[in-house]
Image (cartoon, rainbow, N blue to C red):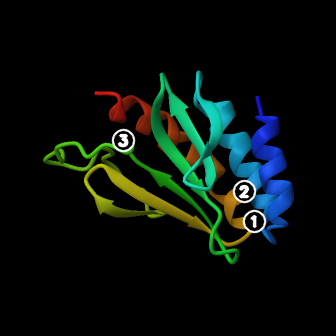
Amino acid sequence: MLNPEVTAFLDELNHPLRPAIDRLREIILSTGAGLEEGIKWNSPNYSLNDEDRITLRVHPPKQAQLVFHRGAKVKEQPKERLLQGPYPILAWKGNDRAIATFRSLEEVQQNSDVLKDIIAKWLEAAAE
């Protein structure tokens, strides 16, 4: 369920990509059972069992980025990327950190199925 605190935060931003951001929120929350939505790092953030897993970075305003990570605490890097497979929308910043960038609602819609797959697999892989 969408967190009213996050909605209010986004209302104040008046972000030009608000429809894309709202769709990303819906995709994340509908895919990740048990995810909790809140604000952290001045952005919408999604945690599972009190462990941060996905941050929806809304700055700068020309894009929205989903940052897939394993939380704020530095952990030992896995030997391989947490997700295997052809995910061209992901830019890897480490074996346990990847970013998907969106510049329009259309881009989000075109990638919604692969995004759901990434989210589900990320939550599973990041928990190990």
Q: Nearer the viewer, mark 3 or mark 1?
A: 3
The numbered mark, 2 or 3, whose residue comes first in the sequence reads 3
Gap between marks 2 and 3 measured at Cα: 26 Å
- Which of the numbered marks, if any, corresponds to residue 109? 2
Q: Nearer the viewer, residue 40 or 48?
A: 40
- Side (left or right) of 39 relative to 86: right
Q: Quadrant of the N terminus?
A: top right
The numbered mark, 3 or 1, whose residue comes first in the sequence reads 3
Helix, strand, or loop for circle 1? Answer: helix
Q: For the point 72% across and 56% down, which residue is it?
A: 109
- Side (left or right) of 98 relative to 12: left
Q: Quadrant of the C terminus?
A: top left
Q: Nearer the viewer, mark 2 or mark 3?
A: 3
Rendering coords of residue 6 (x, y %): 75, 44
Label 3 neighbourhood size at 10 Å, few (<14), some (14-19), many (20+)?
Answer: many
- What's the amino acid at mark 3? Arg
Does 78 appear above or below 66?
A: above
- What's the amino acid at mark 1? Glu
- Can residue 73 be seen here? The reply is yes
- Label 3 belongs to which residue? 70
- Can residue 86 be seen here? The reply is no
Does 60 appear above or below 100?
A: below
- What's the amino acid at mark 2? Gln
Determine whether label 3 and label 1 are within 8 Å by CB.
Answer: no
Helix, strand, or loop for circle 3? Answer: loop
Q: Nearer the viewer, residue 121 or 7?
A: 7
Rendering coords of residue 127 (x, y %): 35, 28
- Label 1 belongs to which residue? 106
Rendering coords of residue 115 (x, y %): 56, 48
- Which of the numbered marks, if any, corresponds to residue 30? none
